[in-house]
Amino acid sequence: MTVEAMTAIGLLSIVLLGTAVGADRATRFTEYSKTAATALTLVQDESEQLMAAAAGSAALAAGAHGDASNPITSTGAAGGTYTRTWTVTSNSPTAGLLSINVQVAWNLYGSDYNVNQVVIRCTSAC
């Protein structure tokens, strides 16, 4: 084989390797974006349910709470990869209000991720 052919094969190998690594990264980032969007939807869904819950509901009691179906799927059904929890703090940020921190956690490619949203609502009619 000539030097030119060996050089061409070497350069082609480097270019193909770079393309393969780039494709792998693109796939991983796409998968992360998909799971993060799902987690944000699950956080928003629970936040809306807690905001609509009747005053005095057990889900609004001060303390830590978890979804009864944990771990959940993207639709909130049991048996998924997401864990949804929320923490209710009474009289925060001021008397008569509840601070509710909703969090969804998941694992992807061996790394832990989470998103959360804090909502404030009245303890009773405002």
Image (tube, rainbow, N blue to C red):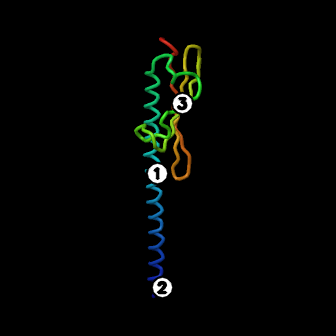
| Residue at image point 59% right, 25% down | 63
Q: Which residue is mark 3?
A: 86
Say which residue appears at 55% left-offset and 52% top-offset: 110
Which of the marked residues, 2 or 3, is nearer the chain's N terminus? Answer: 2
Say which of 4 and 90 sits in front: 90
In the rendered image, the vertical position of residue 121 relative to residue 46, given as above or below:
above
CA distance separating discs 2 and 3? 65 Å
Q: Quadrant of the N terminus?
A: bottom left
Q: Secondary structure at mark 2?
A: helix
Q: Which residue is mark 2?
A: 3
On screen, residue 64 above or below 76: above
Residue 2 image label:
none
For label 3, the SS is strand
Type of residue at label 2?
A: Val
- Compute the Cα span from label 1 to label 3: 27 Å
Residue 38: image location, x then y, percent: 43, 41
Vertical order, 38 against 62 (above or below): below
Q: Position of residue 73 (x, y in %)?
A: 43, 41
Residue that numbered label 1 is attached to: 29
Which badge, 1 or 3, is on the more N-terminal residue? 1
Amino acid identity at mark 1: Phe
Instruction: List x then y, in percent, for residue 60.
Output: 52, 22
- Residue 7: x and y in percent read 47, 79
In what element is the residue under mark 1? Answer: helix
Could you say which is closer to the camera, residue 59 or residue 111?
A: 59
Closer to us: mark 1 or mark 3? 3
- Mark 2, Cα crowd under 10 Å, few <14 / some 14-19 / many 20+, is few
Q: Amino acid at mark 3?
A: Trp
Q: Nearer the viewer, mark 2 or mark 3?
A: 3
Residue at left 46%, top 40%? Answer: 72
